[in-house]
């Protein structure tokens, strides 16, 4: 089977650091995406990890461990505008094609 | 550059009516995706096309749903007949090639079936 788990909700304080975890169980793993979705808006791409390790992009970093089926998104120097839902999505092989399986998202509230 | 364009932005209609959602992907993108998003089920892939050909339609709920992509710049998602449980936000997204590249989403169509 295939399963993606993320915490449903998280709360953090402006200026702090927050880590949003994503665990997955799937065969034929290809890579893992993180998307940000503000309330009432469309998802927007944040990062894509294929190999193990940390990818840094400004205040946001994403980590992947393929052997552990684990990823996290690290948000530094939190700002109020970072309040949003963060979606983890796994790309996997499916026959001759690939599928993208989405988690339900983690709703992050940044408080002053 | 124009992003993915969806229409209409909002649709309210009575059950039993036909609903047609439209999407124009980003020029040069070869893959197009239709999603449905609800609070309970999150983001669900309905169907995706590669070079105008449907690749994976396993997420299409039932025969009431159909999708077409007659050319590289236009796709439709139809629901006929519509039911109240179809109420959701429907997103269209495109990528340069396949699911392993970042997807760019349209603003979505908020569909309410009364």
Image (cartoon, coloured by chain):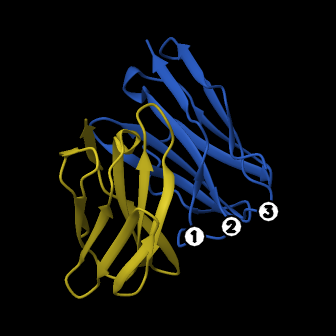
Badge 3: how crowded within 10 Å, few (<14), some, or many (20+)? few
Badge 1 element: loop
Q: Is residue B13 visible?
A: yes
Give the mark nearer the N terminus: 2 vs 1: 2
Residue B18, given in percent of the width and then of the height, sits at 60, 23
Residue A110, given in percent of the width and then of the height, sits at 27, 40
Give the mark nearer the N terminus: 2 vs 3: 3
What tint does the image give chain B? blue
Q: Is residue A45 above or below residue B111?
A: below
Badge 3 element: loop
* A86 sits to left or right of B110: left
Q: Residues at marks 2 and 3, common chain?
A: yes
Q: Residue at x 79, y 62 (%)?
A: B28
Q: Is residue B12 above or below residue A49?
A: above
Badge 1: how crowded within 10 Å, few (<14), some, or many (20+)? some
User: Which residue was labeled with disc 2?
Assistant: B96
Give the mark nearer the N terminus: 1 vs 3: 3
* A41 sits to left or right of A19: right
Among the chains, which one is yellow?
Answer: A
Chain ID of residue with mark 2: B
Chain ID of residue with mark 3: B
User: Which residue was labeled with disc 3?
Assistant: B28
Q: Is residue B38 above or below residue A21?
A: above
User: Which residue was labeled with disc 1?
Assistant: B101
The residue nearer to you, when weighing B9 against B113, is B9
Whether label 2 touches label 1, CB < 8 Å: yes
């Amino acid at each position: 089977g295939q399963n993606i788990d993320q915490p449903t909700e998280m709360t953090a304080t402006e200026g702090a650091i927050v880590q949003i975890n994503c665990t997955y169980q799937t065969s034929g793993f290809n890579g893992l995406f993180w998307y940000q979705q503000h309330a009432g808006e469309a998802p927007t791409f944040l990062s894509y990890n294929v190999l193990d390790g940390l990818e840094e992009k400004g205040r946001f970093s994403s980590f992947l461990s393929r052997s552990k089926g684990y990823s996290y998104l690290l948000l530094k120097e939190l700002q109020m505008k970072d309040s949003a839902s963060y979606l983890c999505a796994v790309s996997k092989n499916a026959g001759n094609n690939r599928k993208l399986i989405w988690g339900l998202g983690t709703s992050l509230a940044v408080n002053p | 550059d124009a992003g993915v364009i969806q229409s209409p932005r909002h649709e309210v209609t009575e059950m039993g009516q036909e609903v047609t959602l439209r999407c124009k992907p980003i020029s040069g993108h070869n893959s197009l995706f239709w999603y449905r998003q609800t609070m309970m089920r999150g983001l669900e892939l309905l169907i995706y096309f590669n070079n105008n050909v449907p690749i994976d339609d396993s997420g299409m709920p039932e025969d009431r749903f159909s999708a077409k992509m007659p050319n590289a710049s236009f796709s439709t998602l139809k629901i006929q007949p519509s039911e109240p449980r179809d109420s959701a936000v429907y997103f269209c997204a495109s990528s340069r090639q396949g699911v392993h590249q970042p997807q760019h989403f349209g603003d979505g169509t908020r569909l309410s079936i009364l």
